[in-house]
Amino acid sequence: MPSREERPLPDSSGPRPDPRLAVTLVGGAALLTLAGVALAGVGVAVGVFPEPEPIEVMEIPARFVEVLLERSEDPTPPSAKGVVWPPPSKPVEKPAEALTHEEVPEATGAGPETEPAAPPSPEQVQQESKLLLALIGTRGEGSTAEDIFSDQDASARSLDEALSRVQGAEVGSANMTVREGQGRRSHGDASIGDLRVEAIASSSGSPLRTGAPSTRVGASPPALRESASAERYVDYGVNEMVLVEQDRLSTFAVDVDTASYAIVRRKLQDGMPVPPSAVRVEEFVNAFDYGYARPPADSGAPFAVHLEAAPSPWRTDRHLLRVGVQGREVPAAERPPLRLTFLVDVSGSMSSFDKIGLVRESLSLLVDQLGPEDSVAVVTYAGRTEVVLEPTSALNKYTIQDAIRRLQTGGGTAMGSGVELAYDLAMQGYVPGAENRVIVLSDGDANIGHTSHEGILRTITAYSQRGITLSTVGFGMGNYQDVMMEQLANKGDGNYSYIDSLQEARAVFVEGLTRTALTIARDVKIQVEFNPQAVIAYRLVGYENRDIADRDFRVDAVDAGEIGSGHSVTAVYELVLKDRPAAELATVRLRAKPPGPDAPAKEWSTVFQRSNMRSEWQEASRSYRLAAAVAAFAEKLRGSPHVLELSWAQVRDLAEDAVRPGVAREAELLTLIDRAARR
């Protein structure tokens, strides 16, 4: 994040307080200090004084702070009484684990230089003060720092529940003493106004630390710097225009994953850089609901195909064709029993609330949706594997919830052994005709153990062919291994999701339970044949890693994607049309297998006529315009050469024209575009 323009600071005399954020326990009551502003109980005391010697100090998780700031209302700006230059007269000694980013010796070369930042505005200090008071206010008078921010407490109650109480917190009018910040944060760290806190407090990934001296506000711990570089994404390139005379067929496997959208959303919300390779356009597009009509109940067809085309909003010489596939919804009365085996990563890298805390919350939400015919088993892996819960009927919800609550982290990571044990348990509880599925919950940061990576993928493929599928759900940031999680789900004939909040957990495990856990079609392939008399060239936007050789469309041994109950899949093509195109533009074919092993594949086809094409962009449906806006957003984020002339303002205009008032995910799109534009 670029630093703000420096402003001259007035001279000051007297003691120079240490400008750090601390939770201090004084006489059993929580006292929080920030840059010379003390907050206690429900009032605000203002003064310039050295920070008292803290009895207990705790960093606030940056993600939690940002969410609170976004949800708090802007208070009336107070007046500022002055600026105090922050450096303490005596350096603060810190333990080795608390060294800041700038202080950690680099393996090669010198560390980054940090320029001093300009003072925060009175409005920023007032908002930060309100936030900090609200944090204490969530637990009331006499609360300790451990009460307020402990991982155990955070996982035991809903974050939304805490936030709902925070929204009502108020700060009385007061004259604030504005204090200069310690310095702007480097890439990878959270920056909220001038309230800068550590995103990760230790190399284990824990978001908080107690009983240790406070580190300097704005410091970036070694774990954050090292783990940020440890994240792994694959660059699959960007599809280019293809001349129809040379290749009239476009063939790909469907992809209903949405993990890429959720990962990038979190990075944008946390002010972190977005690696272009983390952006998979199809997962952005498929993260939104376009309201496709389902196939008629009496048709017997598992899909309904929806085609729409109109002029491109960003290239006057091109058109966009949207291909939408809507899967049928299996009625609750017809849903087969679920035999779920949760494989939970409880290694040390999973210790923070946004990992194991959200795992507990997510599984708890899922269990609440299960019926009397369903069952659950739980396996954990770290330095060793363990069966935490044998296959248990969902009628015994208390037993299942208790096992989930008792999940604790610690130790190394041996995913290979965990996968083998999970499949052993799944085979014990296997029921023909049921939905037998292993669900891996992890940050993907794993050594495989005694089994090779390729061996694990072969094992997953073999069990999938026997009727036990595998889905993955990712958590956390910093050391996240996107490649691992995507590959496991692809080979397991399951889907890949990423959970960064309770809202996303509900989307995956409550609203999307049957889509996540109930397959209606396997190895689903789409092939579009363009008419050379109508189309000069085409480009599939996204799906770079889902490409299938044209000749393999009817080779049923070739693995493809799966569609769950009620799932929809959307693909966007960019077209260059002939001046006078023929009546038929394209033929769209689908090929898929019914659920269950050894079921033969079936094929469906439909023709898109030129007469069905919209002549103007605004004539297209709202959902079509939304899909185009989402695709443009993803293309812009990953630096696609096909949208170089498209500005962020134009992307926002496209989205604003298509979003519906009151639809949270669509409103979120506008916020993310704004954040991306400010990077």
Image (cartoon, rainbow, N blue to C red):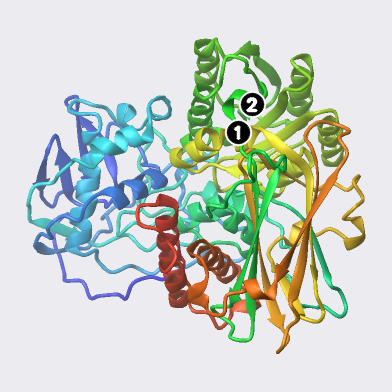
On the image, which quarter does residue 140 sit in?
A: top left
* Type of amino acid under label 1: Thr
Which residue is at the front of the view, 491 or 198? 491
The residue at 60%/33% (across/down) is 514
The residue at 66%/46% (across/down) is 481
**Residue hosting label 2:** 335
Give how far across and how far down residue 248 sits, in percent: 84, 72
Which residue is at the front of the view, 380 or 470? 470
The residue at 55%/83% (across/down) is 645
Give how far across and how far down residue 397 sits, in percent: 52, 14
Give how far across and how far down residue 590 sits, in percent: 78, 53
Give how far across and how far down residue 84 sits, in percent: 18, 61
- In the picture, measured across the screen, residue 424 lies left or right of residue 485, that is right
Element at label 1: helix
Q: Is residue 621 above or below residue 133?
A: below
- In the picture, measured across the screen, residue 123 lies left or right of residue 149, that is left
Which residue is at the front of the view, 546 or 525? 525
**Residue hosting label 1:** 514
Marks 2,1: beta carbons within 8 A = yes
| Residue 185 visible somewhere in the drawing | no
Element at label 2: loop
Query: First in sequence: mark 2 or mark 1?
Result: 2
* Type of amino acid under label 2: Arg
Query: For the image shown, how many numbered marks are present on the structure?
Result: 2
Q: Quadrant of the C terminus?
A: bottom left
| Residue 361 visible somewhere in the drawing | yes
Q: Is residue 196 above or below residue 337?
A: below
